Image: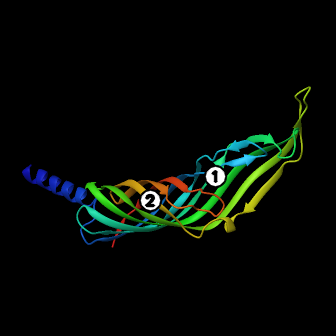
Amino acid sequence: MKRFFFLLSLCATTFFCSAQSRVGTFSIIPKVGVCLSNMTNNDFIIGKNTVCSPKYKAGFTGGVEAEYQLTSPLSVSLAALYTMAGCRYLDESGLSASSTVNYEGYADHTVNVNVINVPLTLNYYVADGLAIKAGLQLGFPVDTNEKYEVTPFTINDRTGEHSYGTMVKHNENTNDKYKSVDVSIPLGVSYEYMHVVVDARYNIGVTKNNKVNDSKSNFFALTVGYKFDM
């Protein structure tokens, strides 16, 4: 019986210790997940005075992360992650800029900023497998566009009846509007269990991401990866 409990405790100790890499270990972590992104100071104006504020947009994120265990509680990580960021707008309508009777309705309006993010983070393990992290991230846009649908319409002053025109779909390439690199600060937490790593982090934009306004990219990302110790 004593031997049984000794073996059980030994296995448990080995299992929990394996939740965190040994000092000097180099690890590779492929990961995939989802992100919720938004862009500050990126209001969209319809006509004269109808202001549409950006909302969070869901997208894919995934890539690979390399981690090196510096000390028992401290490691450093470098990753390359493809992220489908940007923002979206609620369906809205407003008076055309040069009219008092003609309206425009906008629908399915999204700003898509597909970017390669390269975060460098320090990870501090507060418990076996549980780490808090902070660092610096560079973002390199690879493809950007803005999509929306516009439907012109009029409203009869007497009856309130709406008369609709032909809806037009727009898909604009906006690569020339965005800067070649933007900087953000990633803050997050991760937990490793049996080599499976769940990572949640929030990225705070530091520099402007485009040449048109003062917009900055902020996004929350949740990923799941598998840790291979080399």
Between 39 and 41, the one lying in front of the other is: 41
Residue 129, image quadrant:
bottom left
Query: How far is the residue under mark 1 from the one under mark 2?
Result: 20 Å
Residue under the point 12% across and 50% down: 5
Residue under the point 26% across and 72% down: 24
Residue under the point 80% across and 53% down: 169
Residue under numbered circle 2: 185
SS at badge 1: loop
The image shows residue 75 at horizontal and vertical percentages of 30, 65
Marker disc for residue 52: none
Q: Quadrant of the C terminus?
A: bottom left
Residue type at mark 2: give it. Answer: Ile
The image shows residue 193 at horizontal and vertical percentages of 33, 55
Is 180 situated left or right of 81 in this image?
Answer: right
Is 15 situated left or right of 134 in this image?
Answer: left
Residue 192, image quadrant:
bottom left
The outermost residue toward the top is 159
Residue under numbered circle 1: 42
Residue neighbourhood size for the residue with mark 2, other residues' Cα within 10 Å, grouped as few (<14), some (14–19), many (≥20): some
Q: Earlier in the sequence, mark 1 or mark 2?
A: 1
Residue neighbourhood size for the residue with mark 1, other residues' Cα within 10 Å, grouped as few (<14), some (14–19), many (≥20): some
SS at badge 2: strand
Residue type at mark 1: give it. Answer: Asn
The image shows residue 52 at horizontal and vertical percentages of 68, 44
Is 93 situated left or right of 22 in this image?
Answer: right
